Amino acid sequence: MVQANKSFKVSADAPVGGVYVPPSLLPQPFPGLRRNLLLAPRRNPPACARAHVLLSTFLRTSRAAARPPPIRGTATGTKARDRNTTEPSRAITPSELALLSHLRSLSAPILASPDYTSLLQELKGALYNKEYEKAFAGEFGERGKEVYVSRWVPGRVLVYRRVLDEWKDVWQGGRVLVVGGGAGSEVLAALSLLGDAGDTDARSDELATTATTKAKDTTEFQVLDFGDWTSVLQNGVDHFSSSYSLPTTSFTHTFTHTDVLALPPSTLSQLSLPTTNLITIFFTISELFLQSRAKTLALLGTITKQVKRGTILHIIESASLAEIPIGAEGRVYPLGKLLDHALEMGGWEKVESEESRWFRMPLGVDEAYPVKLENMRVVMRVYRRK
């Protein structure tokens, strides 16, 4: 017998007479519905079918209303809940308009190049085929990196500044380790937030933020990347520092050209992991796992051993790359579950978890930037060291 409780499921497509519900178990706010279910089989089949649809709708609505909202872990240790999020469309904000203006001026020389379109198409082909040496150090040279910055960095900066804003109290005035961020998206996003911090007019309409004064302490960024992005990153940092009128004492940045899966002891000691507040691995972790699952897990293990309690590890990856091959049989394993198993067992607390989060470009972005910026669907994890 089927019981009419929260686990009771009735399909609107169920055949007539396929489900029997005792009168005492029917939802009491709808006595007419109970009467239809009891009498419809004797009167006419369509009435019974309609009653099933009404009951199904009522139960689905009741369950949705009773479902608690998704939560994010807090400093008190609230357990994270896996969730999927789709952000509603919204208008572009003044601070985002200013940000895109700075990015447009940063890439103005390459955007004005007569062969920009052909260079972009060739670069897309090289990246699709994972020919990174060709894209960033081969025939394209520095121009390939400049095209990359003009095409992919703006959209990522818009997304990264939103997620970094949620954790600004953790990293502002502290140390940030950026793994795989040579193109500068993470650092530029953070600098735009530092620049906005003292501008209450620019931040008056920002989502889920409040205006704050500029931090007195210096924020230190340490960037690691397999490619040599030294000059590109320096150019971006200089441009943003000038555009936002950032004091020279507000931040510092260093770039290390290295393979993070084979860090030498000398480089590892320079990272100052014990004093790091935030570690970001954005759009990089799947590539690391594909290169070597064992070495990637070893890297995460090294980070775990050296960071202090309370350090935040923030990981974002494209949802289209969120399945990691395991074994020779061609099986795949969800990236999120792989990270949870490796990190929660190793001393990290999962405080935010999303298997599919859509970041939509704000309305008006096409008028603010000359290259099409695309929405992003990502897998996201945030862990706190216990």
Image (cartoon, rainbow, N blue to C red):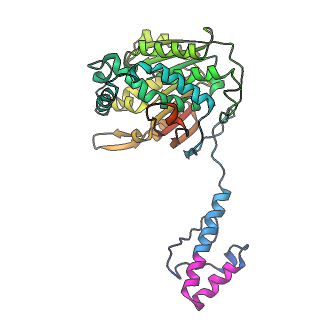
- In screen coordinates, is 24 left or right of 60? right
Residue furthest to the right: 29
Q: Position of residue 248 (x, y in %)?
A: 60, 8
Looking at the rendering, the stretch of residues picked out in magenta corresponds to 32-52
Residue pictured at 68% horizontal, 32% vertical = 209
Residue furthest to the left: 139
Query: In the picture, which quadrant includes the N terminus?
Result: bottom right
User: Which is nearer the eye, 188 or 259?
Assistant: 188
Q: Position of residue 368 (x, y in %)?
A: 52, 31
Whether residue 77 is situated above or below residue 6 in the rendered picture? above
- In screen coordinates, is 337 left or right of 72? left
- Give the quarter of the image for residue 133: top left
Main secondary-structure element of the magenta-colored stretch: helix
- Give the quarter of the image for residue 87: top right
Quick check: is 47 in the magenta stretch?
A: yes
Quick check: is 133 in the magenta stretch?
A: no
Q: Position of residue 303 (x, y in %)?
A: 50, 22
Number of numbered tags placed on the structure image: 0
Q: Position of residue 116 (x, y in %)?
A: 34, 25
Query: In the picture, which quadrant includes the C terminus?
Result: top right
Residue pictured at 46% horizontal, 13% vertical = 235
- In screen coordinates, is 160 left or right of 327? right
- Give the quarter of the image for residue 22: bottom right
Residue pictured at 52% horizontal, 81% vertical = 16
Residue 345 visible? The answer is no
Residue 76 visible? The answer is yes
Whether residue 254 is situated above or below residue 180 in the rendered picture? above
User: Which is nearer the eye, 317 or 188?
Assistant: 188
